[in-house]
Amino acid sequence: MISPIPVPTTGQIHVPARAARLVVEDLTALYGNRVALAGVSIAFPEQSVTALIGPSGCGKSTFLRCLNRIHEAAGTATVRGRVLLDGQDIYAPEVNPIVIRRRVGMVFQRANPFPTMSILDDVTTGLRYAGRARTRMERVEQAERVLRMAALWDEVKDKLNQPGIALSGGQQQRLCIARALAVNPDILLMDEPTSALDPIATAQIEELITSLADAYTMVCVSHNMQQAARISDFTAFMLAGSDYVGHLVEVGETDKIFTRPQDQRTEDYITGRFG
Amino acid sequence: MRLRHLASGAGVVGSGLCAGIAAGILMLILAYVVREGAPAVNWSFLTGVPHPVGVPGGGVANGIVGSAIIVGLATVIALPIGTLTGIYLALYGRGPFADAIRFLADVLSGIPSIAIGLFAYTIFVAPFRHFSGASASVAFAILMLPLIIRTGEEAIGGVPKRVREGALALGISSYAATMHVVVPAARAGLMTGLLLAVARVTGETAPLLFTAFGSQFWELNPTNPMASLALQVFTYAISPYEDWHQQAWAGALLLILAVFILNVLARFALRSRTSR
């Protein structure tokens, strides 16, 4: 396991000791003129889960949305700084965000199956538009592969032609995970993937996240500290100052963050003194 | 305490009474049109063309077909423009430009249809010195636009943002995400808007007076003057002949039926959305 040891530099910059698949350098995200988060530097090691924790409004989701350039889909939103995916800046002018989003998958807070699509069509949407699954046979094969990875195959194999929105909330979320996996991303981003689910569905998703960590670089926003402790190898704590601008306070191995945080604010948050 | 109950009771009774009067007037109109028009509705009325003055019988088939062609052509013009504008407003509609479009659409929906007919006349009839069904379609399309735009914006805006973002996050182009994921999800609302817009213009007469002009014959070519059911009702109603008066009522009955059916379909389309 690669250990991200904060390197002392100016300001709130934290860089792991070794280069990772996804490296963020001095990232600032804006909505129009309003700065939502500033000066975030962090690296996400390969084959691990990094949890992003922090109180509401600290910019966790905004930060996550900068990592696959979905942030800019919201009209006036812009980004400064660099996000390096295998060494290449995804915000470089020649980079096509569509290509980035195929390499950096995302699962949302609330399951979002496509309302008019069957389970089969839904799970293969990314493949079909990338021209990677032309025949129905290919699509079924690919669907089975990723639905098995998402531990959903046995539950839906007899109703691939039924609409995804007819599934339960937990099944819908696993469908969305399968859909994200189908395009073979390198990175998987998850934005509070269990916050709308019951405890049993939550446990299933958490188990899935842990099993996927062997193959993917994962970043998971979580509102729930117990969950972050359960599923992640590394934990990053974010906090918004009195100016409502989010910053990265501290990042490190999850064990260390939860037992011996270096920053007083992290300790206060983890021990429940605020947030 | 007593007074408050009294006032509340009076309010309920009063508003109920007004609702009853409104519904009653509507029923009265319907009943009257049915009474006057129904006897004249028969097979030859539905399938024949108008007979010359003095020859009994004759029908409005050319008007029904003319109305269908004019409204159909108007739909072909207004649907893509209106839907795309609705998509633009719902997905990218921030700032003064979008607000201006919304405002103009609202203003447009309030402009008297005869003014729009006059506009179509100036642009598409006068320069060619020739009345045409197509010029009527242009006028109708303009009348349909605000309805399609605003219901389209509402329908597209009603699709949760996370659905569109979910598609974008898979590495799908913005165009495909919009057209193949968001628009299908909004189809019930879009269909409702379209049906209401069609219903809106089906009974319109004023813009036709100096665009389609009307015709006593079969006319399937929209570059020529064309018959229309609403126009025939108008022509027959102001004529001095008793049997034409009755045909006017019968035509009015058909128009009301068509609009009624369109509204029921619109309701139906909307319900299929909410049941999901």
Image (cartoon, coloured by chain):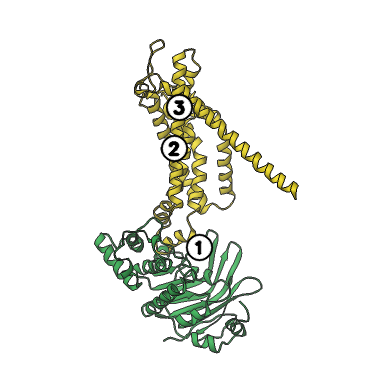
Chain B on-screen colour: yellow
Residue A166's place in the image compared with B48, above or below, is: below
Q: Position of residue B63 (x, y in %)?
A: 40, 25
Q: Position of residue A191 (x, y in %)?
A: 48, 70
Numbered mark located on residue B253 in the image = 3
Name the residue at 52% across, 88% down.
A256
**Number of callouts in the render?**
3
Residue beneath disc 1:
A72
Residue A70's place in the image compared with B271, above or below, is: below
Numbered mark located on residue B19 in the image = none
Name the amino acid, label 1.
Glu
Q: Position of residue B84 (x, y in %)?
A: 46, 46
Q: Are marks 1 and 3 on the same chain?
A: no
How packed mark 1 is, by other alpha carbons closer than 10 Å (few <14, some 14-19, many 20 or more), is some
How packed mark 2 is, by other alpha carbons closer than 10 Å (few <14, some 14-19, many 20 or more), is many
Please tell me whether mark 1 or mark 3 is closer to you in this view.
Answer: 3
Numbered mark located on residue B262 in the image = 2
Please tell me whether mark 2 or mark 1 is closer to you in this view.
Answer: 2
Chain A on-screen colour: green
Q: Position of residue A43 (x, y in %)?
A: 47, 79
Q: Is the Cβ of the residue at disc 2 closer than 8 Å to that at disc 1?
A: no
Q: Residue furthest top?
A: B54
The C terminus of chain B lies in quadrant: bottom left
Answer with the quarter of the image where residue B215 lies. Answer: top left
Q: Secondary structure at mark 3?
A: helix
How packed mark 3 is, by other alpha carbons closer than 10 Å (few <14, some 14-19, many 20 or more), is many
The chain ID associated with circle 1 is A
Mark pair 2, 1: CA separation: 41 Å
Q: Secondary structure at mark 1?
A: helix
The chain ID associated with circle 2 is B
Mark pair 1, 3: CA separation: 54 Å
Name the amino acid, label 3.
Leu
